[in-house]
Image: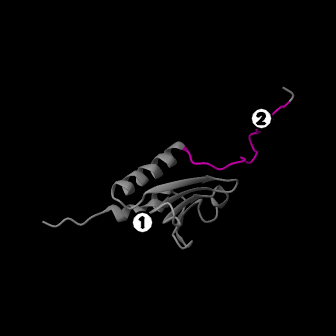
C-alpha cells in the first residue's frame, strides 16, 4: 500500500479527453437513427490526450464514414468540434456539437409527396 496517487489539481490538464454525458447522448442518438435507417453498422470511440473521437462505420472492415472529434485545445481558435469525412477531409468545424451533426442529420430527411 505504498503507492500514493496524487489528486489532480484544479488547473492541471486532464490525462484523457472524453465526451460529456449530454454530448455522448446526442452522438449515440444520431448513431441509433442512422443504424435504423440502414446507413451505419458499427462505431468506435477513441479517447486520447488531445482529442476524443467517435467513428461511425458502414461496415466494420472499412474506414469510418464519419468521425466526430472533440479537441478542447482548439476551443478558442477554430472550435473544438469537427466532422471528418471518409477521406480524412474536415467537412465542418465549429464550437457547438449541434451544428457539426447537422450535415449528417440531413441524410435522414426524406421528401414525402402527396
Image spot of residue 85 (x, y percent): 51, 69
Measured Cα–Cα span from mark 2 to mark 1: 41 Å
> Quadrant of residue 35 in the image?
bottom left
Dominant SS in magenta? loop
| Mark 2 closeness class: few <14, some 14–19, many ≥20 residues within 10 Å | few
Residue at left offset 76%, top offset 45%? 12
- How many marks are shown on the rendered structure? 2
| Mark 1 closeness class: few <14, some 14–19, many ≥20 residues within 10 Å | few
Residue at left offset 61%, top offset 48%? 18
Q: What secondary structure is found at the residue carrying circle 1?
A: helix
Image spot of residue 56 (x, y percent): 49, 59
Residue range highlighted in magenta: 3-20
Residue sticking out furthest to the front: 61
Give yes or no for residue 73 being in the magenta stretch: no
Task: Give the residue at mark 1.
Answer: 103
> Quadrant of residue 111 in the image?
bottom left
Amino acid at each position: 500500500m505504498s503507492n500514493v496517487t496524487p489528486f489532480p489539481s484544479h488547473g492541471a490538464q486532464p490525462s484523457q479527453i472524453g465526451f460529456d454525458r449530454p454530448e455522448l447522448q446526442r452522438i449515440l442518438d444520431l448513431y441509433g437513427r442512422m443504424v435504423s435507417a440502414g446507413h451505419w453498422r458499427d462505431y468506435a470511440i477513441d479517447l486520447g490526450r488531445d482529442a476524443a473521437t467517435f467513428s461511425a462505420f458502414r461496415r466494420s472492415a472499412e474506414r469510418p464514414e464519419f468521425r466526430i472529434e472533440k479537441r478542447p485545445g482548439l476551443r478558442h481558435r477554430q472550435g473544438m468540434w469537427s466532422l471528418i469525412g471518409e477521406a480524412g477531409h474536415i467537412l465542418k468545424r465549429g464550437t457547438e456539437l449541434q451544428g457539426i451533426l447537422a450535415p449528417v442529420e440531413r441524410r435522414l430527411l426524406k421528401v414525402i409527396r402527396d
